[in-house]
Amino acid sequence: MAFKIYTKTGDKGKTALIGGTKVPKSDLRIDAYGTVDELNSYIGLVSDYLTSYPDTVSLLREIQDRLFTIGASLACDPDKDTKMRIPDLHAADITLLEDSIDKMNEVLPEMKSFILPGGHVAVSTCHVARCVCRRAERLCVGLQEQQQFIEPLVLQYVNRLSDYLFVLARWIGHTFQVAEIPWKPRV
């Protein structure tokens, strides 16, 4: 028998965190991990544009795995002990992003102005992912401000990931030989 995707348990606007606590679907914690899921989808789309660059695709798949880890962390009720083993982040995950940023920056020209997203659909999509990542970060900070527990490495990882996505967008443009679009403010 096939697994049914619908359970009908959320039909009244509630969902359960890992641990069983029912919360409204509008809860900040749900918004945070939903945004991480959205980010994961955009990163999948970015990787689909980069099939000729297997090392980059491999790293993006690893990032997607870490985003599932973050989503699981955010989906847990911080006040309950879950029976489920949740994977965790490591400082090495952040170092991997930093090392990748440094490596890409070695081949990129110096930025002399702000740049506008665009020039190639892969570049633009990567900038969309960066913006969604920043929103996820803001939501995670919001949880922290409401005195809701959030793993400190989650905030660090999401912050560094947005930096990585910015540099990746520039690297994609450089690799695809697409000129950056400098912002020329009207003054």
Image (spheres, helix red, strand yellow):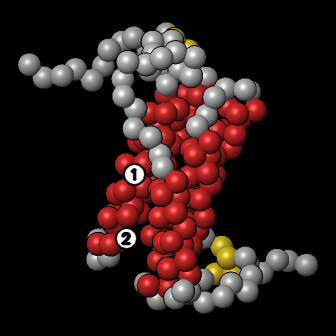
Of the 4 image quadrants, the one containing the C terminus is: bottom right
Q: Is residue 15 visible?
A: no
Which residue sits at x=8%, y=19%?
A: 1
Within the image, what quadrant is residue 25 found in?
Answer: top right
Q: Position of residue 93 (x, y in %)?
A: 47, 56
The residue at 38%/64% (across/down) is 59
Note whether 41 is above or below 128 in the view shown. above
Residue designated by label 1: 64
Residue 130 position, x and y percent, is: 57, 59
Q: CA distance from mark 1 to mark 2?
A: 12 Å
Determine the residue positioned at 67% across, 31% down: 143
Mark 1, secondary structure of its residue: helix
**Residue 21: x percent and y percent?**
51, 12
Mark 1 and mark 2 lie on one chain; the one further toward the N terminus is 2
The reply to whether callout 1 and callout 2 are in contact (CB within 8 Å) is no
Location of residue 155 with respect to 103 vertically, above or below: above
Which residue sits furthest front? Answer: 91
Q: Secondary structure at mark 2?
A: helix
Residue 3, numbered circle? none
Q: Is residue 19 visible?
A: yes
Nearest the viewer among 13 and 160 is 160
Residue closest to the eye, 175 or 186: 175
Nearest the eye: 150 or 113: 150
Left or right for 49, reference 157: left
Residue type, numbered disc 2: Thr
For residue 46, which quarter of the picture? bottom left
Amino acid type at image mark 1: Gln
Residue at the spot 52% in from the left edge and 63% down from the top edge = 95
Residue placed under numbered mark 2 in the picture: 56
User: How many marks do you count on the picture?
Assistant: 2
